[in-house]
Image (tube, grey):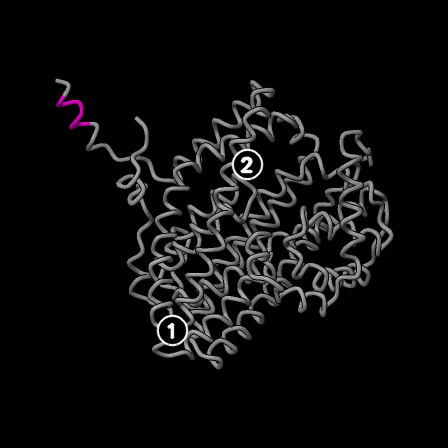
Amino acid sequence: MISQAKQLFSKLKKPSLTVQVFAGLVIGIAIGAVFPALGMEIKPLAVIFLRMIKMLIAPLLFATLVVGIAGTGSHKTLGRMGAKTIGYFTVATIFALFVGLLVANLTQPGMGIPIDLGAGNVSELSQITENAHHVAGHSFWDTLVNMFPTSVVDAMARGEILQLVVFSVFFALALSAAGDAGKPVLQGLESLADVMLKFVGFVMVFAPMGVMAAIAATVGKNGLSVLLVYAKLVSSLYLALIIFMGVVLFTVCWVVRIPIFKFLQAVKEPFVLAFSTASSEAAFPKAMENMEKFGVPKSVVGFVLPTGYSFNLDGSTLYLALASLFIAQMAGIDMPIQQQLLMMLTLMITSKGIAAVPRASLVILAGLCTAFGLPLEGIAVILGIDHVLDMGRTSVNLVGNCLATAVVARWEGILDDEKMLAFVPDEETDDVSEAMPLPA
């Protein structure tokens, strides 16, 4: 009887990573709502998971990008791909800004909400304001200079993805130019890339636990009632994000001939990770892995995806457009359309290249408020619900960048249609379950 039960159990399918993460999300909400103190106490589990993700990003990105470019890349190819990438990012950003403006003007989410500077938000608002002053002089040249690291080790340690991309590109081009002398290094990096993908599998085992702890801490701290207070702002943002993703996904996928349902399958797991943890970094390794399986070459994934983390934050840009008008409406400040367009132009410039700044969206928003005479106290109102807003904008950032990799690959004529059409999401934790069985 026992042996039969074991055989039956062994034939049962393990739930997919998406199902596990979603279960962790639901359990975390329940813990935070019913046992708020416990929810806040288990937050370190979320921190541990995010640290595990961060420790593998640098070697994974370096190995993948160098192998992809050194194997097939050239100065001319890389320059052409870079121009197409920035062009696509610019168009997507402009569209995101206009969707945010449109929804904010239609729904008027700030009307009737008083500015109340909660005591618990005073210190955090001060820190955000200080960071805003620090980046107030941020210019095109600052962005350009900050792309080049003084030390790649320092860039890895601080998680400066854009600096790591620049170093990896130059290293790959030098490795390619070295010819036979560089082949042993290239082979070593190919092995490192394979090892790091296995490493990703190990870390993903802990994803449901990390998600559970992250959402439990958030609900435990703010409570579910906070959603009712800011229901109009939350619903306005998510409506804008849905409109943006719907129009962009269907239009872009139709134009560049990408089957939308296959693409949705490819981004499903990284989307759930990004949404539930409100962290793009948590979803980065899985996004790289899935887009390669989807038929996007390593060189394109390794270049476009991390570059997008600094230059193509569609969800965050849309949020900034909506949040700035939310604060103006809350303060009773009438902003004519000319001023709104000027504010969007300012956002186009200031939102690029400072993704590594803590609470970057709020920092940019603080700088925008200062420049256009909006009350900084309005940010304190948003702080109480910012995590819920961050979940939406972060997941849209992730999907937008995944789509960008497929678009650039199509424009370069190197998107593998056979792999794309044959793509099947991992229904199990496949490689992980073999190498590191989950506890019964």
Could you tell me what secondary structure mostly forms the magenta stretch?
helix
Q: Is residue 197 left or right of residue 146?
A: left
The x, y position of residue 302, in whole percent, is 46, 63
Q: How many marks?
A: 2
> Which residue corresponds to the image point at 26% horizontal and 41% vertical from the top-left?
434
Residue 401 or residue 52, whichever sits in front: 52
Q: Where the C terminus falls, by quadrant? A: top left
Q: Are marks 2 and 1 in contact (CB under 8 Å)?
A: no
In the image, residue 141 sits, relative to residue 200, either above or below, namely: below
The x, y position of residue 403, in whole percent, is 48, 60
Residue 193 or residue 88, whichever sits in front: 193
The stretch in magenta equals 3-8
The x, y position of residue 236, in whole percent, is 65, 44
Residue 182, numbered label: 1
Amino acid identity at mark 1 = Gly
Amino acid identity at mark 2 = Val
> Which residue corresponds to the image point at 65% horizontal and 61% vertical from the top-left?
353
The kind of secondary structure element at disc 2 is: helix
Task: Identify the mark nearer the N-term, 2 or 1.
Answer: 2
Distance between the alpha carbons at the discs numbered 2 and 1: 39 Å
Label 1 packing within 10 angstroms: few (<14), some (14-19), many (20+) = some
Q: Is residue 124 visible?
A: yes
Magenta span includes 267: no
The x, y position of residue 419, in whole percent, is 30, 62
The kind of secondary structure element at disc 1 is: helix
Which residue of the protein is positioned furthest toward the bottom in this rendering?
A: 76
Label 2 packing within 10 angstroms: few (<14), some (14-19), many (20+) = some
Residue 251 or residue 282, whichever sits in front: 282
Q: Is residue 3 left or right of residue 164?
A: left
> Which residue corresponds to the image point at 69% horizontal and 59% vertical from the top-left?
351
Q: Which residue is mark 2?
A: 47
Identify the image quadrant of residue 150: bottom right
